[in-house]
Image (cartoon, rainbow, N blue to C red):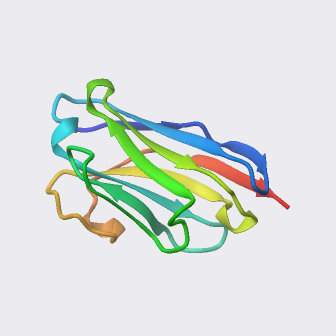
Amino acid sequence: QVQLVESGGGLVQTGGSLRLSCAASGRTFSRYVMGWFRQPPGKEREFVAVINWTGSTTYAADSVKGRFTISRDNAKNTVYLQMNSLKPEDTAVYYCAADTRNNWSVRPQLYDYWGQGTQVTVSS
């Protein structure tokens, strides 16, 4: 069982920055691929970024590439999403998720555990 708790969301102006954190429970956190997803108002959940278990490899969606950075600290059981140059279209509930089978996927269906989400609102 893995429990995930996101934090760091809030209201920010266009061009601003936020850093989201996702704290995980469980001794095997360091073995899992971790992902960030988001769900804009009235839309489906979409992939944002993914990181492998060591943190050596990452992949981000084209819409956030160059602006968002995913990272992890296995000693702290935490994965981060640094978001810079935020735009109004980044407004969404942001979720972290654990892929315990290491599928390395952008599909939310292949992630086993999810946090409760944290709201990010970017004002124009």
Q: Nearer the viewer, residue 54 or 104?
A: 54
Q: Position of residue 102 (x, y in %)?
A: 16, 57
Position of the N terminus, as image quadrant, is top left
Instruction: Name the image quarter holding residue 124.
Output: bottom right
Res. 11 in view: yes
Res. 117 in view: no
> Across the whole image, how many numbered discs are drawn on residues?
0
- The residue at 54%/53% (across/down) is 94
Q: Is residue 7 left or right of residue 99?
A: right
101, above or below 8, in the image = below
Q: Position of residue 9 (x, y in %)?
A: 63, 42
- The residue at 72%/63% (across/down) is 87
34, above or below 38, in the image = above
- The residue at 34%/70% (across/down) is 106
95, above or below 72, in the image = below
Q: In the current view of this chain or complex, which residue is farthest to the top? A: 75
Q: Is residue 67 left or right of residue 12?
A: left
Q: Position of residue 101 (x, y in %)?
A: 14, 56
Q: Position of residue 24 (x, y in %)?
A: 33, 34
Q: Is residue 112 left or right of residue 92?
A: left
